[in-house]
Structures are given as C-alpha cells and as structure tokens.
Image: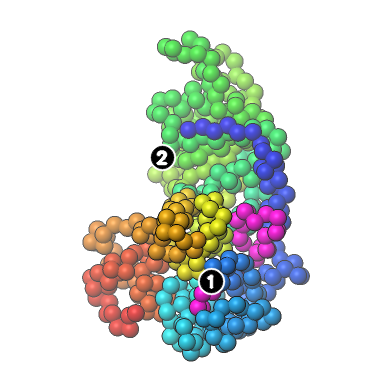
Amino acid sequence: MVARTPLTHRDSRLASRYARYPVHSTADDISATAGDGDDLAPIVVLVAIGEKSLVQAFALDGELMLGRRIRDFELDDHRVSREHATVRFEHGTWVIADRGSHNGTFVDGARVAGEVRRRGDCVVRLGHSVFLLVRDGRGYAPLPADEPDQVIGPELARVYDQVRRHAGERTLVVQGESGSGKELVARLFHAAGPRAGGPFVAVNCATIPEGVAERLLFGSRKGAFSGAQDATGYLQSAHGGTLFLDEIAELDLAVQPKLLRALENREVTPVGANAPIEIDVGIVCASHRELRTEVATRRFREDLYYRLSRAVVRLPPLRERRLDLSKLIIRELALVDRKLVAHARLVETCCTRPWPGNIRELCGAVRIAGGAALAAGRAVVRPEDLPPDAGMPMTEPVAAAPANTPALERAQVIDALANAGGVISVAARSLGLHRTQLYRLMDKLGIARDGES
C-alpha cells in the first residue's frame, strides 16, 4: 500500500539523464527533417536483424529504399533482396511498397502485395529484419553506450521533458493506463525538483481500506479512537520530499476536502491532535481514469482537481512507444538469462500487439517466453514461446455491443479496413478485436468480405 524509499544514486542521476532527450531538434539531430509540412519528423528505425538487436535510425528525405544496403548502412540479412521495398511519408501517411521481393514485405504482421498506406506508426519486416516507422521522431536520440538498460524513445522523451519543466511546481497529475509506468514519472519529477534530497513516499489509494484514509494520510494521536497510538501519516512521512498518490480517483470523497485544505495551508492535523503540523511536500497524483470525467460524474471533487492539476502530463501507452517496446524485450530477456536473444519475429510480434497491460504485461510475458526457450534448450526466443494471449486485447463479445450504435460501428469498421488496405488481421488489431470477432461484426453490419486477406 505504501512504499517509502530513500533517493538512490540511480534516482539522483535521472534529472540530468532525461535532459539528454530534448523535444526541440538541433541542426545535427536526426529529427531535423520535417515531414511534408505536417510539423512531424518521420524516421525509419531498424531494431532487429535475425537474433541481433540494435537501433539504427534513418531520417526520411523523400523515398527510402530498404534492401541489402540502406544508404551507407550494410544490412546483413541474406533473406532481404537487394532492392526489397520502399517507404515514404506523404501528408501524414506512410506509404510502403514491396519491390517484388522473393521473401515478401510484412506490414504490422501481414504480408502485403504492391503498395499499402498506414496513417499511424507501423512495423515492417523484411526477411529477418524489423523496422519501426515512426511518424514523429522529434526528440529521438541514440542511448548512451554506457546505459544500455535505459528505455527512452521519442514519445517518452517528450513526457520527460514536460516533467522536467514542471519539476518546480508543488503538484503534478499523471494520466496513463495501468502498467504504463506512472510511478517512474513520479520519481523523475521528484529527482528533478527542489525536494530531490528528501524522501519519496508511494501510496496506492485503491488499496486503502474504507474508513481509514484520513488517519493514514494525516496520522493520529494516542487515544483519538479505540486502540489508537501515535502514528505518522503519509504526508508527514514525505515532509521535505514527494508523496506519490497512485489511483487518486479512488480516494474516499470524504477525505478529499481535508487533503485540499492540507495542500492549501501546507499543514496537517493528525486525528486526535489539537494543533496542526507544518509540512513541505510535493504531490504527484496518478490515475488510469480521466480525472475531468470523474469530476463531471461527481466521483472526484472539482476544487481538489483544480488544485492538483496545475501541471498535467499524459503518459503514452506502450503500443504508442514501439521503440521502447523493442528495447524492453532485450532488457527483460537479459534479466532471465544473459545468453537469451530475441528472434526478429518475436520483436515483430510484440510490436504488433496492443498490450493493454502495458509494460507490466509485456515484462511478464517476455520473461515467461525466455523461460520456455530455456526449458526447450534454446537461447533464441521466438514468438511461439509467448503465452497465447500475451498482449492481446480483452474484449467483450461482439453481440454485447450497444444496439443503438450500428451506424457508428459500421463507419469505424469501414475506416479501419480502408486504413489496413483490406487486411483483416491488421484492421482487427486497430479496433481491439480478434480476427474472428471482426468477421462476425462485418457480417452483422453487412460489410462484404471482398478483397480480404
């Protein structure tokens, strides 16, 4: 429920580390190339060749030929043709074309023929080489060689830059899905701010038993209630440092005005005490739910929201951080056994799944896969080693969809199919469905299966 940890040497280096990943491009930064006036910096990043993981980025300047030689880079993959495929970025859309290769071009896990278009970031595999096509690579920078365990892609770099700019504030709200790394952001805020030398106290509000939030937050005095002893509250424990309140939307409504008063007055009054105690605490609050929606539905106090949300950052889910995802796979396999390596198809498979549980789910699944490979006497980890449902969406049966939304559903499905070039498996993933569920939905909505693949 609560974790009180001192600032470690690793934490103290975080502020200076993420300052290396600026949002704004420089003259010699790979992000200096803009994309067709869209204020984007599209990049193509090679993340795996066979069983070798690496990060080799190419800024886009017109059309890029992918083959045995990519500009001055020699691609050591015998399954890749000399001129295998081309990619270009037009008006916010990726255009990928197979050049009649022998082993095929795969986009988001599906083999394509001719030219296909994708609006968002996508995964391209040629032979045993995996590329990530990133629409906005601003802030991208190769990781320092002495810090191979760090996982910071351009999306996360932009969030960290925001955290650094807000580090002088007294409060920060972090919005993000479950398992997306909200506590790490809180620790970065702490490490970059004026209270970095103080304690960092982490509390999960969802695990606080009903009726005890007040005494846990503010402390208590002996005799305040039956069996009460002198106890220090979380706010006092974090004095001079930072208190991280995870899942703040779960905090008891009756306690919320008292927390607001403590923040406004910078003091707490323990249960049963006669006088307040001054505190100097930075507050980071996190929630996987949108707090403005919680306020609108009266599940969270409006006044407390406005006091906390003077600085807000939104943490992207793992499916929007595919550069980070490929590096996380490498890191997690090394934690299982340093001799384990990821096959390119494992990287491709992981990069094409939505991972609703984000980093937490990915790390668990990759460790299971590593263990399965070791049990089979292999050092190479393949996609077949993953649990069957790893990274897959948790969806309700199609029949459970509201009866009054067929027009909206039909438009969404048609748009998804168009974006996927008619590839059913790709369209299904974009809608958060299994392939068979999409088939049933298409039949229900009267959408023909012509041209499906």
Q: Secondary structure at mark 2?
A: loop
Query: What is the x, y in percent for residue 206?
Result: 43, 37
The residue closer to the viewer here, 130 or 311, is 130
| Tag 1 residue | 50
| In the image: residue 224, left or right of residue 88 | left
Q: Is residue 186 visible?
A: yes
Query: What is the x, y in percent for residue 355?
Result: 44, 58
10 Å crowding of disc 2: few (<14), some (14-19), many (20+): some
Disc 1 marks which amino acid?
A: Gly
| Tag 2 residue | 299
Number of marks in the rendered image: 2
Q: Residue furthest top?
A: 223
Query: What is the x, y in percent for residue 18?
Result: 68, 53
Q: Quadrant of the C terminus?
A: bottom left
Image: magenta residue range:
126-154
Disc 2 marks which amino acid?
A: Arg
As drawn, 197 above or below 158? above
Residue 139 drawn in magenta:
yes
Kindly indicate whether the residue at mark 1 contacts the one at mark 2 (C-beta within 8 angstroms). Answer: no
Tell me which residue sits at (53%, 62%) in the image.
341
3D distance between C-alphas at marks 2 and 1:
51 Å
